[in-house]
Image (cartoon, grey):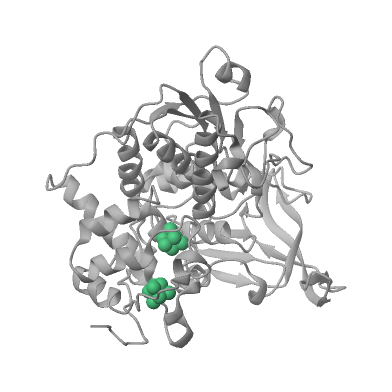
Amino acid sequence: MINLSTAGTRMPMQAPEERTKNLNEVAEGFTEEMAVREALRCLQCREHPCMTEGCPVSNHIPDFIRKITEGEYEEAYQILMETTVLPAVCGRVCPKYLQCEGNCVRGEKGRPVAIGALERFVADLHRRRVLAGELQEPVSMEKDPTGKKVAVIGSGPAGLACAKDLASAGYQVTIFDRAEVPGGVLAYGIPSFRLPDEVLSFEIEGLAAAGVQFEAGKELGKDITLDSLLGELGFSAVFLGNGTGSPMGLGIPGTELSGVISAADFLDRLNTAGGDEKKLAEVLPGAKTIAIIGGGNVAMDACRSAVRIPGVEKVSVIYRRSVLEMPADPAELAEATEEGVEFVYLTAPLKVQGEGGRVTGLLCQKMELSEPDASGRRKPVPVEGSDHVIPVDVVIEAIGSRSENHILDGVDVNERGLVVVDPQTLATGREGVFAGGDTVTGPKTVIAAMGAGRKAARAIDHYLKKKGINGAYE
Ligand code: SF4
Ligand code: SF4
């Protein structure tokens, strides 16, 4: 029986006035009754554009949703695990409105099916049942061991997805990461009120239990090199999934002042502090007024984190275009607004002002949008005589990141520092070395990186089986 409601089922959330006082997850998840009711809204479309057009890893969306309607939740989980490695993570952090849900036909008349919330429900239920001892995780994914070793650089979404598929195909996979905690941007860049630590660590532990090895604190170009991996360490192939490591700066005077910090460093400090209130207060000591520069999802994570820091009185996001051009997820924008974040549009910073080496304000100018250029985008242009100072004591730069790939021996990088690959196979110019995710494309979504990791795993498998890398896409 299909549920013909166009309104859909809303996920329960912590109230704004409560959630800004803690770092607990804002969205509380579907109950079983809610999940079944929402799953019944799926039309089981034959063309299923949610999957074919919308999901970068091609999750079998109608199939797993049908299992929910039948009460077969563990079967729904197993269907998801055929294509993804982090369902509880993706169900939370995917920009679903652009992907699966953005392509759901129910969205043409009302709300799309809440595919992400259903994915999260199934994965969370699986985790709770494993932790309660009601279910066992599979001990090993290996089918027929190939005897070959593959190194994966970076334990973010691209690396994890690549590692899972290669381990399933019988390779011995080792993931190297310069950080101590695996997960890359998922562990260090997404605040716990969007992605609790235990959700990520459970999904990563599942990979470790299935035979993937993790080498923490190992940095490419410092502790290991492509030569050593492919030489004395005995790896037959390498996948580079090391993301874009360096935050971009504002490039304006005054950013050397104390009180200017990148969003990546800020979120890293916040995640390291965990839920400890004393440590949290030390993340930005003495901060009362905070400006975040940028309009993407990292800016949203930064501003929503900033309002949760004890003692902070005002948080503003400063963006040089209008709300219509803002790339952030509209749901994040709405939640940030509910939490008291102020949005200052059509404003660009010119200089960080300071006194005694500390930030005291941000000199800004108003902008207006010109006519669309050839690319269709309206360019912001300064309004003459509109300079003004916004008093702040902390400035958080959230304008993107750049790659550090100059350290890669024998692998071509472009002028933006991004690794150059064959787009079909993700093979680099160096024999046996493949790359995918942000390190190739620049910053994109978690699930796009996972899709690239899976694609590279297929190519590596074909390469190592001497089928030739182009065979991966026959
Ligand atoms: Fe949607 Fe992301 Fe899940 Fe794919 S992985 S079904 S895009 S939420
Ligand atoms: Fe179900 Fe929407 Fe996918 Fe159709 S497009 S199968 S309604 S989730």
Q: Is residue 466 left or right of residue 50?
A: right
Quadrant of the snapshot with the N terminus: bottom left
Foreground of the two, 114 or 73: 73
Quarter of the rendering containing residue 448 = bottom right
Q: Taking 4 as reference, is 313 above or below it?
A: above
* Residue shown at the point (65%, 49%) measured from the top left: 441
Which quadrant of the frame does ligand 1 lie within? bottom left
* Residue shown at the point (56%, 71%) measured from the top left: 342
Residue 234 in view in this figure? yes
Foreground of the two, 43 or 192: 43
Across and down, in percent, residue 4 comes to 31, 87
Q: Taking 265 as reference, is 105 above or below it?
A: below
Across and down, in percent, residue 468 comes to 59, 34
Residue 334 in view in this figure? no
Across and down, in percent, residue 318 comes to 65, 65
Across and down, in percent, residue 256 comes to 71, 42
Q: Is residue 125 left or right of residue 375?
A: left
Q: Taking 40 as reference, is 123 above or below it?
A: above
Q: Is residue 59 left or right of residue 290?
A: left
Q: Is residue 137 left or right of residue 48?
A: left
Foreground of the two, 158 or 294: 158
Q: Taking 206 as reference, is 218 above or below it?
A: above
